[in-house]
Image (cartoon, grey):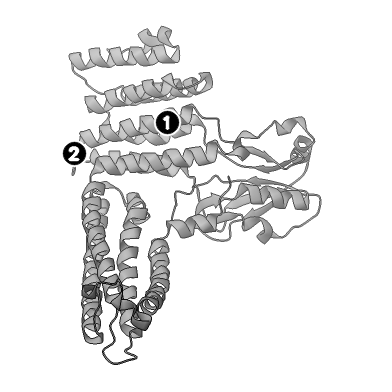
């Protein structure tokens, strides 16, 4: 199902849930005053409401002001904790991993509840008026309930932060989000409902006509391509659009972004460019490659001399094997998209499976090829991926295996390490159906 890029950006914004809870607290404040008026009208307090829950105007104002100041303090502590976590992410993991914590709904929800609780108490303090002598109020009891809820949420937040700051949980979260992104993109109806456009008239049109080339309006990363809307626009204006850059690519004002094949000399640029979202920052809006790069970057940083943590790098390789083995069992991303009349309308670029392998493991091989444990983990990962792959993707794995062995050619491994590497390599070749090549690439 196609998603609106604007809606996805709003949902991933740090202000989305806090703003929602802030608006909700305004309605709750007026609702509380209304309930207070209904329940305590005409002697209602003498029937079933415990007196211990009721307060006069002076006590009510004291309770509300104390709770409001306490919630503001808790909100400040929460902000400080978030900044500490962000600093840790920047120094230990990856700047790209910041998005996973900031856009996490649990983090946003905690901040939203604190913000909403503060607004709730401040509004009650402003609106609470004594209309008769010795009047009692129930709303301070509601505010106390909100304060207890905020305290429970604060304890949860401390636990949440201590869990999130662990690299294993961070990698798991990135992996899960990447897998979800893969399913949204590759298992969607528009991706599965494809046919061969080159059996129709469009092949001749594209090969014989000169396209209208439009450059990008601004510099940045291609965050999202709204393909269903683009297909609809192309169908309306009877044209074919070829997107020259793939999602996640960096473009500037001089980069050709779309090519339009149409009979008329010119068409409105804005009609088509509005369906392609370009921003200064890269966002994980169905961007599979971005999730893979984040895991790889954490692994590369773990292999740096300043950190020297090969175990974390191995954990990253294991997570990459999970992502790529799932990716290898999915249909290839659609390149050609047709309208409801089965006419070709949109052509997009997609990375092939070898490119995903290269993005995932080449940086880790480059910086970790001298580490025996890292190399064996990569071969294990390739074996797992190969076991889930169809023949064309096994060929991509074979090409990448040859590339990896070439990079490791000059490394001096111990004899026992070579024996183990040859054994793992033999298993990998068997999974790809390349056992005959073993004698040609064996570690000597």
Among all residues in the image, which is located at the extreme bottom? 133
The one of 283 and 72 positioned closer to us in this rendering:
72
Q: Is residue 282 left or right of residue 169?
A: right
Identify the residue under disc 1. Answer: 324
Quadrant for the N terminus, please.
top right
Most foreground residue, 68 or 47: 47
Camera-side residue: 395 or 112?
Answer: 112
Q: Which mark is residue 364?
A: none
At 71% across and 53% down in the image, what residue appears? 233
Pinpoint residue 338: horizontal percent, then vertical percent. 70, 40
Q: Is residue 367 visible?
A: no
Q: Position of residue 425 (x, y in %)?
A: 33, 15
Name which quarter of the figure residue 70 lies in: bottom left
Quadrant in the rendering for residue 316: top left
Q: Separation of disc 2 and disc 1 at Cα?
A: 25 Å
Which of discs 2 and 1 lies nearer the camera? The answer is: 1
Quadrant housing the C terminus: top left
Residue 237 vs 383, above or below: the answer is below
Name the one closer to the observer, 349 or 37. 37
At 48% from the left and 38% from the top, the residue drawn is 182
Label located before the other in sequence (2 or 1):
2
Circle 2 packing at 10 Å, graded few (<14), some (14-19), many (20+), is few
Judging by the rendered image, the residue that carries numbered circle 2 is 308
In the rendered image, the vertical position of residue 417 relative to residue 367, given as above or below: above
Above or below for 342 versus 257 = above
Could you tell whether 222 is left or right of 298 in the image? Answer: right
Seen at 29% across and 77% down, the residue is 46
Mark 2 lies on a secondary structure that is loop
User: Disc 1 on helix, strand or loop?
Assistant: helix
Residue in the picture at 24% in, 52% down: 161
């Amino acid at each position: 199902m196609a998603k609106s890029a604007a809606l996805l950006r709003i949902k991933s914004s740090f202000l989305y849930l806090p703003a929602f809870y802030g608006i909700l607290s305004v309605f709750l404040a007026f609702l509380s005053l209304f309930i207070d008026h209904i329940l305590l009208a005409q002697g209602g307090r003498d029937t079933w409401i415990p007196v211990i829950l009721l307060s006069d105007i002076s006590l009510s104002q004291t309770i509300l002001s104390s709770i409001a100041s306490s919630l503001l303090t808790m909100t400040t502590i929460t902000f400080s904790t978030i900044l500490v976590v962000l600093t840790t992410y920047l120094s230990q993991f990856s700047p790209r991993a910041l998005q996973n914590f900031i856009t996490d709904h649990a983090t946003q929800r905690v901040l939203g509840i604190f913000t909403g609780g503060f607004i709730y108490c401040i509004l009650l303090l402003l609106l609470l008026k004594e209309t008769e002598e010795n009047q009692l109020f129930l709303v301070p009891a509601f505010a106390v309930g909100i304060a207890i809820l905020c305290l429970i949420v604060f304890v949860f937040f401390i636990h949440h932060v201590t869990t999130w700051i662990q690299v294993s949980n961070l990698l798991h979260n990135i992996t899960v989000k990447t897998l979800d992104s893969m399913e949204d993109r590759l298992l969607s109806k528009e991706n599965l409902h494809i046919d061969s456009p080159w059996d129709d008239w469009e092949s001749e049109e594209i090969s014989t006509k000169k396209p209208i080339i439009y450059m990008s309006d601004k510099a940045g990363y291609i965050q999202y391509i709204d393909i269903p809307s683009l297909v609809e626009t192309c169908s309306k204006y009877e044209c074919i659009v070829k997107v020259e850059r793939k999602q996640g690519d960096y473009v500037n004002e001089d980069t050709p972004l779309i090519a339009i094949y149409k009979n008329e000399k010119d068409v409105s640029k804005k009609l088509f460019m509005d369906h392609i979202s370009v921003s200064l920052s890269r966002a994980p809006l169905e961007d599979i490659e971005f999730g893979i790069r984040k895991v790889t970057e954490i692994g590369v940083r773990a292999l740096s001399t300043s950190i020297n943590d090969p175990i974390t790098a191995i954990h990253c390789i294991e997570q990459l094997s999970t992502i790529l083995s799932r990716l290898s069992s999915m249909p290839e991303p659609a390149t050609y998209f047709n309208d409801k009349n089965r006419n070709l309308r949109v052509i997009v670029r997609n990375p092939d499976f070898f490119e995903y392998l290269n993005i995932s493991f080449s940086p880790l091989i480059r910086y970790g090829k001298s580490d025996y444990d890292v190399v064996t983990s990569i071969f294990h990962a390739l074996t797992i991926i190969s076991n889930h792959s169809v023949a064309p993707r096994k060929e991509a794995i074979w090409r990448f295996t040859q590339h990896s062995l070439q990079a490791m050619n000059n490394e001096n491994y111990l004899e026992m390490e070579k024996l183990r590497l040859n054994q793992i390599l033999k298993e990998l070749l068997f999974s790809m159906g390349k056992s005959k090549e073993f004698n040609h690439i064996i570690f000597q």
